[in-house]
Image (cartoon, helix red, strand yellow):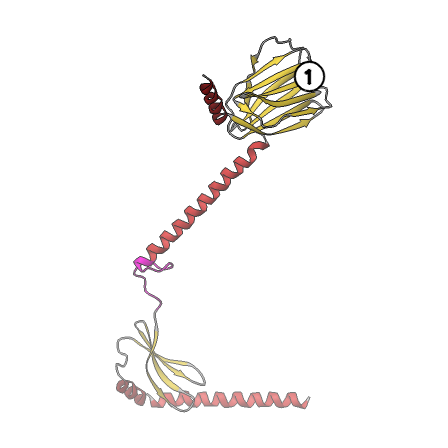
Amino acid sequence: MRALLILAVLAQLLFGSTILTFKLYERDDRVDVLLTFDTPYEGRISQKRSDTTTYITFNDATYDQSITKTVNSKFISAFTLASQGTSALMSIQMPQTAQLSVSKTVDNYGLRLRFEAGTSALPTLKESTALSTTTPLVTNENAPSMLNTQYIIVIALLFIGVGVLFWVKRRVQKEGNSWLFAAGTKAANEVRILFQKNLDAHNRVVMIEVGTKHYLALVGNSNVLLDTFGDEAPVSQENFDAMLRQNKTQLDKYMELDNRTSTQDALDAYKEKASLERY
């Protein structure tokens, strides 16, 4: 029989809740006592009231300390909290004109006892009666839990986003496609110099291929586009040299004009420099 009693007590201690902390808040119109538990408290709360003292029993709950506190309030004057077997007992000295209401937090980790002025005097209770709890209370005790939940959600979304980015990157690399161009898109047309011939130390004629177009240009002291070709463009260096010999007269005119321009530019620059040195 004694062994069964010990097992029952151990089971109660194992599956019951433990009161971790309590906080007392005094206001002009009320006094609040907040209790926090190590596990969600689902036990039964009962009260027994005498002329000046109210006893509140928290079944399936324990408290590893014993405290007594004096309060300078018109609603309560003192209270004591201690364990009694497998329950926690709170004795409160309060006048008959004060009333008590109990509210749980949403997660059942917290419990609020509110003492405030009543509408009428409460009768003296000879026997223990159950206290009903009001709608779950959202207090600051829930803030850490809510913040933890939001933090976990944000971290999960970040991991999902990173995973999607890595998946897209690996798929694009596997297919050999560019991030900016669709599959099969070619780069811009390349510029190639097919043929060229030096005319003097500073000028030369070049045949440039851009896509399907061919351009004949004079490159050197000045860059001049001489002609544009399609399919009839030279296909070898010999053809290119022959074309230049046939158009030697026009090339000489371009060269003469270019030399005149260069000489005039040099003369103008000398005159400008001389005028600056004079002043």
Horizontal side, residue 45 vs residue 190: left or right? right
Q: Quadrant of residue 207?
A: bottom left
Residue 136 visible in the snapshot? no
Magenta range is: 173-188
Residue 65: x %, y % from top left: 61, 27
Give the position of the N terminus as an image quadrant. Answer: top left
Horizontal side, residue 75 vs residue 157: left or right? right
Identify whether 148 is placed above or below 40: below
The question of residue 184 being in magenta is answered with yes
Residue 2: x %, y % from top left: 47, 18
Residue ID for mark 1: 94
Q: Nearer the viewer, residue 172 or 242?
A: 172
Identify the secondary structure beneath mark 1.
Answer: loop
Residue 21: x %, y % from top left: 60, 30
* Residue at the spot 61% in from the left edge and 23% down from the top edge: 82
Q: Dominant secondary structure of the magenta stretch?
A: loop
